[in-house]
Image (tube, rainbow, N blue to C red):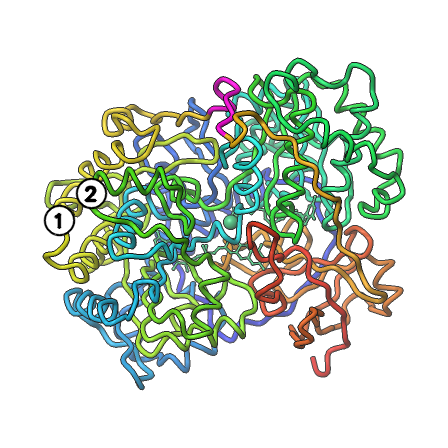
């Protein structure tokens, strides 16, 4: 079967709704995988590509950051990983002729879905001042333009270098080196919108902003709590680990406003039993209200404290700090307040407590449901308190498990993509390269948008991602981006950020994970770090989408040469020629990467050191794991309003839309839906199938409106609603962010609903 041409536009958004499903994966998932892959790649390429996903001699799946087991299956990928691969390995192409036929004004009217469906970009493209059409440009001229604009800035801090978390370690290391040699720490990344709250909370409490468990810990846990995460869609391979844990006797508690199919029952497509029957995963479902998690964990902590013998006193004495203050705060937790904040019944919480007390080892997993609220950092600190109380960190089967999003988002941070780098990191970098990195902090994502808006930033460079669609307050952000003098996107596929540009714009097409990367010294590989601190190699095997593509490390190296010129003593050409020379430098700058080249040559790679996990060493300011005692917060909802969370459907990867279905939730052929509890809907007079506008209410009084959403009566928690991102990013105010981490609070937007004027 040959690949299919892309869909036409305008895309019909006419959602069809059926009852939500109660099991994930199984045969329908296999059928969907193959259908989507065939459409993009055709049959032969599908087979050739999918069999290399996550193999030791293959490439790392560009889907999520979930780790691989040491023993690999022949098909070591999931439905959604296969969609991510097909999206990149598509045989469709966006050529200069395409841009000639589609001026920016035309592309700006297309949906993100349509843009993504057009295929891989084949040549560097330039949009000049006053022009409406991208034209081809040579690489040399492109770098010359970037260098000229960067050198013309009155301060290096007028430039912003954004990274999306797919970037390899090698490219990320070069990008941060270039930015700092140029003179700025303006290195925002998608992590600022993602697990920044986890990083902030964990660094303060356990001394390292990364998860403390291995896959083996998950398999051996007696209790796993999955809070604020939808693994059936976003980390499908995690279901295999949960299934394995269940079979070894683990219990699972799901904490979520939505009953997510993947957490109910998993039909493992790799086993006959799985395909036919599946394994029921969740033992206790706590259908919590949005933002109620801190209150829940605080009360559980109080109940543990009140149970004789339940606290691991030896651990608390030897390894922790701040216990007394925390215990006093926890003892004051109030049942009534907790029940109001969580919407749970007393019996639910008592059942959870019994499971907690019965378990000798507990893992807590979480994702965006915990990180994207105003009080996300204290919420995650409360999770840490909960684990510390019973010594559930640094022992088998126990620990913190923030489940990362993008496949190398954790690695990018390890490589120094961070607007607030530590002094130790900068000292090592300066010593290795003989440079003087700036010490003042740079912009994170929200501050970068504010700086663009206020005219303080003038050049915006993105290493991947889709900045204007992924960020909050779409209208504000798009206006901010239009004020830039130059916007540059290193991309594989077309997206909204290419059509909302500065005065001048460049699109630099690059190799993806699946593409073979050959440089002057021969075939290259890159490296990535997964959610559990495993570092390993990734090798693409497909001929690149076009002969004009440059790799990400090559693009950074050439941009650096065009900008820094002869003044730079950094061997940029050598880095481009042979990535092993980049890894040699990484091994001397980043702790844990000693002998990088030889250790990563081993199949499967190596695990980075992690003090709390390895030997209960906590590199915090106090030298111990810190209990913390923040006041309990939860969202307060005015009369007649709902609290909206913005989340992912089953057919998308962040801003990349694969299709218009959300199979497990029973939604088909459309994305403009709002899921509302039937009782709330009745109280608000919203019939199922009626159309409504979503209006966000924020203290600045600005009206933010997303029109035309089909109301779907859905079993979400009372007072809560859900709709897909990025369509709802217009509703998230730019300065509605989490305390400390500054992450947009995109899981707690207060909205009112108004009947749509016209449908
Ligand atoms: N196929 C696919 N895979 C992906 C992605 C993708 O878009 N598509 N994105 C990748 C990225 S970058 C990331 S960060 C991850 C995201 O992975 P997830 O965090 O699973 O993604 P979301 O769709 O935002 O889902 C949030 C979940 O938290 C729940 N939730 C929301 N608010 C609350 C709350 O206040 N409390 C609790 N307890 N639960 C809450 C929601 O109901 C939902 O189940 O996935 C990664 N993997
Ligand atoms: N309202 C709301 N907003 C959110 C979230 C939410 O839950 N709700 N989630 C947030 C989260 S967790 C995240 S991580 C961000 C995601 O923010 P981003 O990482 O910026 O967005 P993506 O949609 O993942 O980026 C997709 C684009 O990356 C490019 N790309 C793909 N592969 C490659 C590659 O190999 N190299 C290069 N150079 N480019 C490539 C393609 O051009 C594609 O269009 O969004 C955040 N925004
Ligand atoms: Mo993410």
**Crowding near the residue tagged with mark 2, few <14, some 14–19, many ≥20 C-alpha atoms within 10 Å:** some
Residue drawn at 73 percent across, 51 percent down: 290
Boundaries of the magenta span = 611-619
Asked if residue 57 is among those painted magenta in the image, a careful observer would answer: no
**Depth order, front residue of 328/449:** 328
Q: Quadrant of residue 548?
A: bottom left
Cβ of mark 2 under 8 Å from ligand 2: the answer is: no
Kindly identify which numbered label has been placed on residue 433.
2
Kindly identify which numbered label has been placed on residue 264.
none
Q: Is residue 277 visible?
A: no
Task: Look at the picture and state if 364 lies above or below 743.
Answer: above
Figure quadrant of the C terminus: bottom right
Mark 1 vs 2, N-terminal side: 2
**Residue 337 pos. (x, y %):** 86, 45
Kindly identify which numbered label has been placed on residue 569.
1
Residue drawn at 33 percent across, 75 percent down: 485
**Residue 327 pos. (x, y %):** 75, 29
Q: Are marks 1 and 2 in contact (CB under 8 Å)?
A: yes
Check disc 1 and report its element: helix, strand or loop.
loop
């Amino acid at each position: 079967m040959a690949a299919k041409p892309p869909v036409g536009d305008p895309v019909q958004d006419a959602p069809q709704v059926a009852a939500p499903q109660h099991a994930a994966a199984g045969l329908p998932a296999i059928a969907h995988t193959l259908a989507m892959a065939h459409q993009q790649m055709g049959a032969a390429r599908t087979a050739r590509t999918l069999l290399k996903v996550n193999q030791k001699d293959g490439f790392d799946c560009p889907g999520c950051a979930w780790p691989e087991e040491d023993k690999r299956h022949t098909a070591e990928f999931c439905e959604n990983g296969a969609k991510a691969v097909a999206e990149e390995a598509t045989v469709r192409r966006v050529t200069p002729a395409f841009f000639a036929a589609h001026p920016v004004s035309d592309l700006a009217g297309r949906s993100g879905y349509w843009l993504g469906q057009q295929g891989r970009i084949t040549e560097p493209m330039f949009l000049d001042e006053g022009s409406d059409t991208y034209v081809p440009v040579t690489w040399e001229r492109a770098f010359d333009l970037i260098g000229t604009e960067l050198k013309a800035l009155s301060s290096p801090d007028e430039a912003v270098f954004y990274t999306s978390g797919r970037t390899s370690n090698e490219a990320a290391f070069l990008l941060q080196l270039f930015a700092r040699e140029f003179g700025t720490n303006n290195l925002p990344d998608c992590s600022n919108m993602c697990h920044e709250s986890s990083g902030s909370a964990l660094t303060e409490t356990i001394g390292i902003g990364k998860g403390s468990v291995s896959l083996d810990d998950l398999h051996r846990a007696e209790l796993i709590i999955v809070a604020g995460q939808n693994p059936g869609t976003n980390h499908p391979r995690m279901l295999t680990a949960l299934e394995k844990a269940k079979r070894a006797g683990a219990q699972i508690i799901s904490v979520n406003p939505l009953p997510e199919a993947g957490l109910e029952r998993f039909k493992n497509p790799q086993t006959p039993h799985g395909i036919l029957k599946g394994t029921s995963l969740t033992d206790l479902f706590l259908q919590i209200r949005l933002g109620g998690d801190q209150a829940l964990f605080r009360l559980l902590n109080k109940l543990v404290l009140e149970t004789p013998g339940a606290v691991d006193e030896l651990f608390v004495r030897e390894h922790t700090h701040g216990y007394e203050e925390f215990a006093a705060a926890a003892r004051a937790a109030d049942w009534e307040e907790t029940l109001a904040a969580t919407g749970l019944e007393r019996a639910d919480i008592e059942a959870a407590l019994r499971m907690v007390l019965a378990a000798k080892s507990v893992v807590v997993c979480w994702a965006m449901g915990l990180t994207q609220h105003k009080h996300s950092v204290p919420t995650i600190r409360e999770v840490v308190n909960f684990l510390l109380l019973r010594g559930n960190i640094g022992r088998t089967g126990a620990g913190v498990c923030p489940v990362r999003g993008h496949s190398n988002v954790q690695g990018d941070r390890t490589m120094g993509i961070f607007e607030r780098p530590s002094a130790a990191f900068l000292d090592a970098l300066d010593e290795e390269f003989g440079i003087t990195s700036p010490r003042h902090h740079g912009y994170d994502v929200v501050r970068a948008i504010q700086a663009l808006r206020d005219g303080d930033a003038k050049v915006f460079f993105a290493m991947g991602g889709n900045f204007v669609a992924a960020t909050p307050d779409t209208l504000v952000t798009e206006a901010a981006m239009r004020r830039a003098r130059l916007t540059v996107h290193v991309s594989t596929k077309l997206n909204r950020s290419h059509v909302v540009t500065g005065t001048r714009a460049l699109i630099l097409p690059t190799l993806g994970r699946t593409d073979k990367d050959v440089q002057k010294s021969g075939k290259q590989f890159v490296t990535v770090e997964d959610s559990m601190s495993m570092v390993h190699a990734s090798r693409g095997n497909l001929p690149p989408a076009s002969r004009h593509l440059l790799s990400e490390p090559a693009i950074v190296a050439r941009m650096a040469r065009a900008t820094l010129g002869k003044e730079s003593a950094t061997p940029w050409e050598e880095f481009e020629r042979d990535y092993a020379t980049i890894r040699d430098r990484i091994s001397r700058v980043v702790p844990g990467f000693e002998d990088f080249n030889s250790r990563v040559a081993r199949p499967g790679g190596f695990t980075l050191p992690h003090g709390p996990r390895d030997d209960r060493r906590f590199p915090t300011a106090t030298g111990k794991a810190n209990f913390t005692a923040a006041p309990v917060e939860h969202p307060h909802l005015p009369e007649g309003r709902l609290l909206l969370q913005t989340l992912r459907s089953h057919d998308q990867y962040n801003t990349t839309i694969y299709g218009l279905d959300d199979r497990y939730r029973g939604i088909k052929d459309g994305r403009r839906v709002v899921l509302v509890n039937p009782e709330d809907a009745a109280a608000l007079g919203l019939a199922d199938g009626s159309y409504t506008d979503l209006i966000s209410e924020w203290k600045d009084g600005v009206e933010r409106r997303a029109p035309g959403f089909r109301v779907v009566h859905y079993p979400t928690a009372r007072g809560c609603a859900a709709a897909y991102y990025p369509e709802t990013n217009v509703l998230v105010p730019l300065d509605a962010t989490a305390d400390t981490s500054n992450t947009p609070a995109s899981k707690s937007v207060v909205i009112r609903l108004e009947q749509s004027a016209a449908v």
